Amino acid sequence: MVKVIAVAQQKGGAGKTMLAAQLGVAFAAGRRVALLDIDPQASLSAWGRLRAANPKAQPGVTIESVSGWRLAVSLDALRRDYDIVVIDTPPVLDSDARRAIRGADLVLVPLNPTPPDLWAAEGTLKLAAEERRAVALVFNRAPAASKLRRRLETEIAARRLLLLAESLGNRAGFANAFADGLGVAETGPASVAGVEIMALAERIVTLLG
């Protein structure tokens, strides 16, 4: 059964598009994956064009751009042909973001381990709760350990929100791969970044059942 993941976060700079692309490539190991770009900035679509022109890109990842009422129609069509659909949502709580969250099995909220990122996630968390969708938070560009990170971990736990133990560090490998239309799971699967993204992908697959 196909599973839909909406990557959502109001705050810019949290790494939403990068995470969607990296996870899409990681998921594609043995699965059919579709990435849906509904962000007006269209960064994921630009990455997809680079990917289409790169002979090193592995098969199994389809990238489409859609908006408005067509999102539900596109999801219905993709559910017939893919195992996982990842939606890169806009950094605002508009009707498109609501449609994406409503159609998702999991809302994945990336955040740098700083208070502003957690504050900015409040609207997304509220919207997911209204739509009764499962939510998981994931630290991105995170130090292995810091006083601030531990503080946020404590606050998130106190609110009974799910923070995934698997996080992504501030690794150049992610950005370098993205710049070529690739995922770090392709360019450096044995690198620290490659190991991190595969561990996160496996954890999410487990969550989705």
Image (cartoon, rainbow, N blue to C red):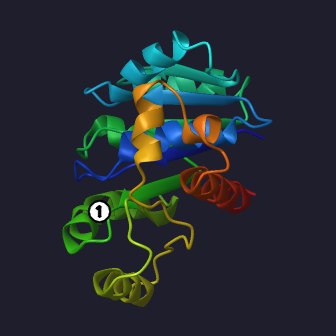
Identify the residue shown where x is 46% and y is 83%.
160
Q: Is residue 101 visible?
A: no
Identify the residue shown where x is 65% and y is 52%.
198
| Element assignment for label 1 | loop
Q: Nearer the viewer, residue 200 or 108?
A: 200
Q: Is residue 132 above or below residue 101?
A: below
Mark 1 Cα within 10 Å, few/some/many (few <14, many 20+)? some
Q: Is residue 199 visible?
A: yes
Q: Nearer the viewer, residue 148 or 90?
A: 148
Identify the image quadrant of the C terminus: bottom right
Q: Is residue 143 left or right of residue 167?
A: left
Total marks placed = 1
Q: Nearer the viewer, residue 204 or 101?
A: 204
Q: Nearer the viewer, residue 86 or 49?
A: 49
Q: Position of residue 182 (x, y in %)?
A: 53, 29
Q: Position of residue 117 (x, y in %)?
A: 25, 64
Furthest residue in direction top, as rendered: 53
Name the residue beneath numbered marker 1: 121
